[in-house]
Structure formats: structure tokens, C-alpha cells
Image (cartoon, helix red, strand yellow):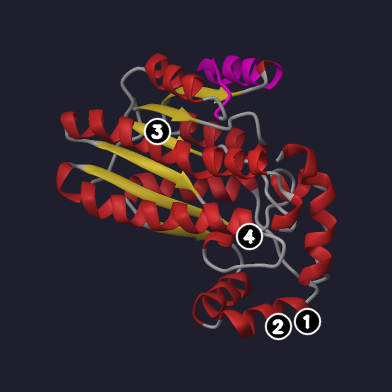
Amino acid sequence: MTRQNIKGARALVTGATGGIGQAIARALHAQGAELVLSGRRTDILEPLAKELGAQVIVADLADLDDVARLLRESGSLDILIANAALPASGALLEYTHEEILRNVSVNLTVPILMARDTAEAMVGRGHGQIVMIGSMSGRTASASASMYNATKFGLRGFSLALRQDLAGHGVGVSLVEPGFIRDAGMFVEAGGKLPRGVRTSTPQQVAKGVVKAIKRDRAEIVVAPIELRAGAAVGSVFPTLSARLQKAGGGDAVIDSMVEGQRSKR
């Protein structure tokens, strides 16, 4: 087990323009990290960087040349937070080939590439922590979420396997998996609506999970109420039963409330 000291560590946070990314950045800053913030919107990144004394690198993770430049300009990293992702609700038949490739690239291929390259340098130094921001959608499948499920299931398998590969080199790999998040994130931005009684978590709780993952070198941290965790556990073992329970609990309405709001971001 390796435990990365956050104070004084150089940490890259991708997707820092979103509410969850901002919360993670602030939490790491409070722990004394030296931050590199990345995203596509300078109007959000620059005020945040000024607040936190961070470096800004504007990059589009759908462009592999931009990914290479981001890693090059980030310098020697002690911590990588792979937080950036594209939303992907809606039936697969509604997606073009280009949208599928873009989604798989940003949500899965790019985190793998970034982990590979940062891990190489971390192994050479004998320390470091890679944190992937996954999702409860990487633990159980849902209707009209085949693309998002595919990338988040893949990210979970990759993270847990890479953790084993790097265990003897002083480099930790952690996966933080949020459920429904209020106040910020894909669900809120898409105008998603949950059935009455379904609880949510906050961006700050996700950020707290990230800090815990780094400090304790935790393999996997789920940030969601107990009932959602239980539902995911059922879904991972009994997918047919899970599909029926989701439908009975209003799952179709939840997805319908998100699809239109996310269509333009594929």
C-alpha cells in the first residue's frame, strides 16, 4: 500500500470547469496541493486558478494532440485526477459513429493514456497517485445509457487492474464513483429529475472521497446513499431483476429527463 502526501504535491485536475472538478480542486488546495487545472473554458478556469494559485492549461481532451500537450505542460505530477467526461444518455441507435468514437475516447481512452504516461514517471520516482472519477453507472447498467455504462464499466476494470500492476512500485490507483449529484455535474446540467425520495450527494462529498482515496490509497470509494449502493450491488449480480426494479422505480422518467439536455454534448 502506498499513501501519497497531498501537501506540496503537484496535482492535475481535468474537467476543472465543472462543479465536481471545482470542488475537487478546492479540496486539494485546502490540503496544500500545487494545482494544475485543465478544461476548455478559460472564463471559468482563470478565476478559479486565481483563487487557488493554480496553473491553467486549456485543452480539449477529444483532441489527442491536446492531451499530449496537456501532459507535457503539466510537468512532473504527483497526483492525477482524471475527472473530465462527456455525458452519454440516450439509445445507442441515436448515436452517429463519430459521437460513439468521441465518447469512448474522452471517457475511457484518454484516461487510460493519461494514466499510462503519468504512471511511467511516477514509477520512476517511486511514488504517486492516480484517481479516476468513475460512476455508479460503472457498477450496474441502465436503460438508455449503454454508451455511458460501457465507458464507466471499462474505467472501473482498468483502474482496479492497473492498481494491481503498480502496487509494487509505490504508485496507487483509486476509483471514486459518484451517484446522482445535486447542485452541479452532468445530471443537474441536463435538467435531470429524480423520483420523490431518491437521495443525492454533493460535489463536496465527491471531493472528500477523492482526498480520502489519495491519503489512504483506497482502491474504490462510492459516493452515494446506501439505497443506491444496494441497488448497484443487486444490478451487478442480477441484471434482469435490476432492470425490472429500475423500471418500476421510475428509471425511464429519469433517463427521459436527461436525454434532451445532454444530446448536444455527445
Q: Do the residues labelled 2 and 1 touch (CB within 8 Å)?
A: yes
Residue pointed to by mark 4: 146
Residue displayed at 37% across by 51% down: 159
Label 3 packing within 10 angstroms: few (<14), some (14-19), many (20+): some
What kind of residue is marked 4? Answer: Ser
- Disc number lying in front (3 or 4): 4
Residue pointed to by mark 1: 248
Residue displayed at 56% across by 37% down: 84
Q: How far apart are marks 2 and 4 (CA)?
A: 17 Å
Spot occupied by residue 39 in the image (x, y as percentages of width and height): 59, 25
Q: Give the range drawn in magenta.
A: 43-61
Label 1 packing within 10 angstroms: few (<14), some (14-19), many (20+): few
Q: Distance between the residues labelled 3 and 4?
A: 24 Å
Q: Are marks 2 and 4 in contact (CB under 8 Å)?
A: no
Which of disc 4 and disc 2 is earlier in sequence? 4
Residue pointed to by mark 3: 114
Within the image, what quadrant is residue 103 found in? top right
Q: How far apart are marks 4 and 1 (CA)?
A: 19 Å
Label 2 packing within 10 angstroms: few (<14), some (14-19), many (20+): few
What kind of residue is marked 2? Answer: Arg
Asked if one can make out residue 1 in the rendered structure from this viewpoint, the answer is: no
Spot occupied by residue 249 in the image (x, y as percentages of width and height): 77, 78
Q: In this view, does 166 lie above or below 125?
A: below
Residue pointed to by mark 2: 244
Residue displayed at 83% across by 70% down: 196
Which of disc 3 and disc 2 is earlier in sequence? 3
Residue displayed at 52% across by 76% down: 233
